[in-house]
């Protein structure tokens, strides 16, 4: 279970989840939040457009890209590889700043890549074949992720524009709009150009410099040499001649790119960067044999509507990130997955201690550890040390709470259902059944079983699913405390008696 929270407010107790719900940290006492080691991710700031609206805009537009461009299906070697590499990069981003990134491959010969608000990313197959190594391809992807991270497209939209953009999504049909009206016109006001060549964000040189900087941090933390990003863009610029590559039409070269990156990374701690992989070379070789189209061919096909039919025939259908991540996890382990820990290192002791969390008192196994949030809005965890990885909590309990908007009271079923949908959309958890009544601390709550990929591999090194037992309990002030009890599906029965004992011990 990934310790992932979406967007925090200035008030340390609250973070925006949905218009209906807000995350809160259960601890009322002041926390001193630790800072990440150098290099540090910057605070992306607050644009006029909410995260919810950015995500909505990105998903709506991504669905239209599937109608205007030839997209490889998720089952293709190129898409599988790009998704795996993309998740390796995503895992470096602090959860409070991250997005539900997803990765798609366009069957276009020209070198280009673009990322939409909220996380959908498209990489031309020409970018894969033009990259000299995995680090260069990762550099292009990290650069695009950095635009989403910094919310550059949303920052270009004023608050007045935001309302018209979102209002137009539901009714405008991309490609059917003419002139400056409809969604095309609204996106144009925002600094986004959409045509048969694909969607292009009209970034500034300042945006490009920021994307280079943040993208370099992503590369470095993922184990790649950040110099590779500058190398790729330098080569791309040298090949352009009088006709700039398509990439530079939407990504203006900020100038001195290579020098600036070298200066930035010169003071970073030394690291042994990831070696070249045979997987990249195999995928690049396979990509050279895939039917790819020129920009002109794609433009003609978009006018006739042929790409929607071809994509459907090839099995290339657009699915939001939750479905994509779930399908991918069935065929490949998470980049951050680790070998399964020994039973002795994670099984709970029969001896219990009491944790006083301010709002809640709970007993827990004495050989487990209570970890308070190190960032605003994240979960409290009670888990064995061996049961926690950079990829998430594989054994133990996560605790947090939700709070309806001010002045509005939702019943426990409404809150639980909203919470399940959010976990499903943003964390890839899938419900297995419906919520059932449960009594905790003398209060009737709800319990529902969910399922997601475990951050731990099986003993034989294969990916596995975990069981996530979500329990929600309402409070008198409208707050709903919730807990997620986690263990691999094959081992959950060994932990359930302890989890039930912990629930029975709770005092509010």
Image: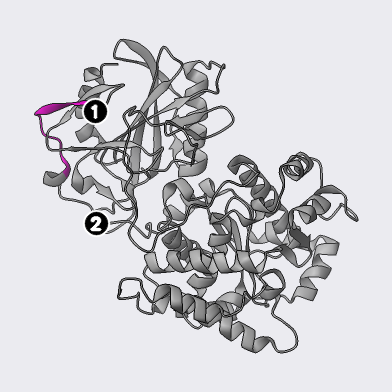
Residue 186 versus residue 278 in the image, above or below: above
Which residue is tagged 1? 499
Per the rendering, the mark at residue 339 is 2
- The earlier-in-sequence mark between 2 and 1 is 2
Q: In what element is the residue under mark 1? A: helix
Provide residue 345's location: percent of width, then percent of height: 14, 46
Nearer to us in this view, 29 or 302: 29
Residue 171 versus residue 259 in the image, above or below: above
Residue at image coords 10%, 29%: 350
The answer to if 458 sits in the magenta stretch is no
Nearer to us in this view, 498 or 38: 38
Provide residue 446's location: percent of width, then percent of height: 40, 20
Provide residue 447's location: percent of width, then percent of height: 38, 23
Res. 314 image quadrant: bottom right
Q: Residues within 10 Å of mark 2 (few under 14, many from 20)?
A: some
In magenta, the rendered stretch is 346-356
Provide residue 316's location: percent of width, then percent of height: 63, 58
> In the shown orientation, is residue 366 left or right of residue 211?
left
Image label count? 2
Res. 264 image quadrant: bottom left
Nearer to us in this view, 201 or 348: 201
């Amino acid at each position: 279970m990934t310790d992932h929270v979406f967007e925090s407010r200035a008030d340390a107790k609250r973070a925006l989840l949905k218009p209906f719900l807000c995350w809160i940290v259960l601890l009322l006492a002041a926390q001193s939040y630790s800072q990440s080691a150098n290099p540090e991710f910057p605070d992306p700031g607050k644009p006029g457009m909410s995260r919810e609206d950015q995500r909505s805009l990105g998903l709506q537009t991504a669905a239209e890209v599937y109608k205007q461009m030839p997209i490889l299906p998720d089952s293709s070697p190129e898409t599988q590889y790009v998704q795996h590499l993309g998740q390796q990069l995503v895992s470096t981003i602090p959860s409070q700043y991250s997005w539900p990134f997803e990765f798609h491959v366009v069957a276009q010969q020209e070198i280009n890549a673009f990322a939409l608000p909220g996380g959908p990313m498209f990489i031309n197959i020409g970018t894969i074949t033009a990259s000299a190594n995995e680090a260069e391809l990762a550099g292009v992807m990290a650069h695009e992720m950095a635009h989403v991270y910094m919310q550059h497209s949303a920052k270009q939209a004023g608050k007045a524009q935001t309302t018209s953009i979102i209002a137009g999504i539901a009714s405008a049909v991309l490609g059917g709009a003419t002139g400056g009206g409809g969604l095309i016109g609204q996106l144009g006001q925002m600094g986004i150009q959409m045509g048969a060549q694909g969607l292009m964000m009209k970034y500034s040189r300042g945006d490009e410099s920021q994307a280079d900087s943040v993208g370099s941090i992503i590369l470095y933390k993922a184990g790649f040499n950040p110099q590779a990003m500058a190398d790729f863009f330098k080569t791309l610029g040298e090949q352009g001649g009088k006709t700039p590559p398509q990439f530079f039409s939407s990504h203006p070269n900020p100038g001195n790119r290579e020098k600036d990156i070298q200066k930035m990374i010169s003071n970073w701690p030394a690291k042994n960067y990831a070696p070249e992989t045979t997987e990249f070379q195999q995928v690049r070789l396979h990509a050279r044999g895939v039917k790819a189209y020129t920009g002109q061919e794609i433009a003609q096909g978009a006018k006739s509507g042929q790409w929607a039919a071809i994509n459907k025939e090839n099995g290339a259908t657009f699915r939001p990130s939750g479905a994509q991540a779930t399908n991918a996890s069935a065929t490949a382990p998470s980049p951050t997955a680790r070998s399964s820990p020994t039973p002795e290192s994670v099984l709970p002791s029969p001896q219990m201690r009491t944790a006083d969390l301010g709002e809640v008192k709970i007993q827990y196994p004495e050989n487990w550890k209570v970890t308070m949030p190190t960032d605003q809005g994240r979960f409290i965890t009670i888990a064995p040390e061996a049961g926690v990885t950079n990829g998430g909590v594989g054994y133990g309990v996560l605790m947090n709470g939700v709070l309806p908007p001010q002045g509005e009271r939702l019943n426990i079923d409404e809150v639980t259902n909203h919470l399940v949908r959010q976990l499903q959309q943003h964390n890839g958890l899938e419900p297995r059944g419906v919520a059932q009544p449960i009594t905790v601390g003398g209060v009737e709550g709800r319990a529902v079983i969910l399922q997601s990929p475990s951050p731990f591999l099986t003993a034989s090194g294969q990916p596995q699913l975990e069981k996530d037992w979500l329990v929600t309990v309402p409070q008198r002030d409208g707050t709903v405390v919730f807990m997620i009890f986690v263990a691999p599906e094959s081992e959950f029965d060994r932990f359930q008696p302890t989890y039930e004992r912990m629930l029975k011990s709770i005092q509010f």
